[in-house]
Amino acid sequence: MSLTHAWGLFTHPNQEWRSIREEQPSVLNFILSYLLLMAAIPAICGYLGTSMTGWQLPGGSETVYLTQQSAAIMSVLAYFATVAAIISIAAFVHWMAKTFDTNPTFAQCLAFTAYTATPLLIGGIAGLVPSLWLATIVGTAMICWSAYLLYTGIPVFMDIPFEKGLVFASSVLCVALVVLVSTMAVTVTLWNLGAGPVYL
């Protein structure tokens, strides 16, 4: 049922949020049946795109590739970073919910966070063809849709007034940005330790 919700969030999000709210998933089952599968999309596509499709640098005619080992290491690290980021944001949503007089379970908060991030995860398909323009267009579109799901979904999913939902959503967005910056800092550290890209 989880993958069906992913499609519904693109076609009729408000109705889909109500359906998701009625479910009582277990944390482990949701992680295994949805989060781990969806997080694999950008990781696998990124691996294939950088190691097999390749890309061209601005002003150059030669196609650039990463070694398969380097691409694999970076994809695995990105995969676990994605899963960890979503779980971290879900923990904040669960903690913050009490401030807004609602009491969802952690599993429900995890589901909400993962479904909100679904457009970004699906947008990872663009990684099959590494291109700055394609990444910009697809990334911008998916970020906008995830933000739309966040701001319209919290009032419905948490069953709180729309005005409170705006404040709640803005708080979640700020935390997501902090997690993103933290992930980038960890990435730089790992690159300096030897996990950076290795080109053919």
Image (cartoon, rainbow, N blue to C red):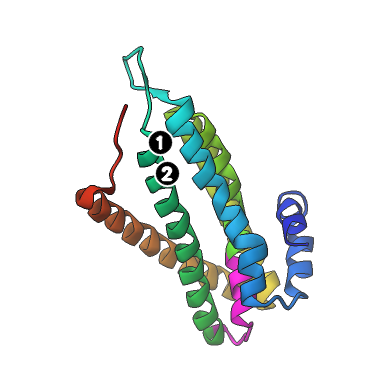
**Is residue 17 rendered to the left or right of residue 184?**
right
Q: In the displayed image of the protein, which residue is found farthest to the front?
A: 69
Percent across and percent down for residue 26 are 67, 77
Q: Residue at x 38, y 46 (%)?
A: 74
- Dot 2 falls on a residue whose secondary structure is helix
Residue furthest toward the left? 192
Q: Amino acid at mark 1?
A: Gln
> What residue appears at the point 28 percent right and 44 percent down from the top-left corner?
196
Query: What is the crowding at mark 2: few (fewer than 14 residues within 10 Å), some, or many (at least 20)?
Result: some
Q: Position of residue 129 (x, y in %)?
A: 51, 29
Q: Nearer the viewer, residue 108 or 55?
A: 55
Q: Dominant secondary structure of the magenta stretch?
A: helix
Q: Nearer the viewer, residue 189 or 133?
A: 189
Residue under label 2: 72
Image quadrant in which you'd find residue 19:
bottom right
Q: Foreground residue, 101 or 19?
A: 19
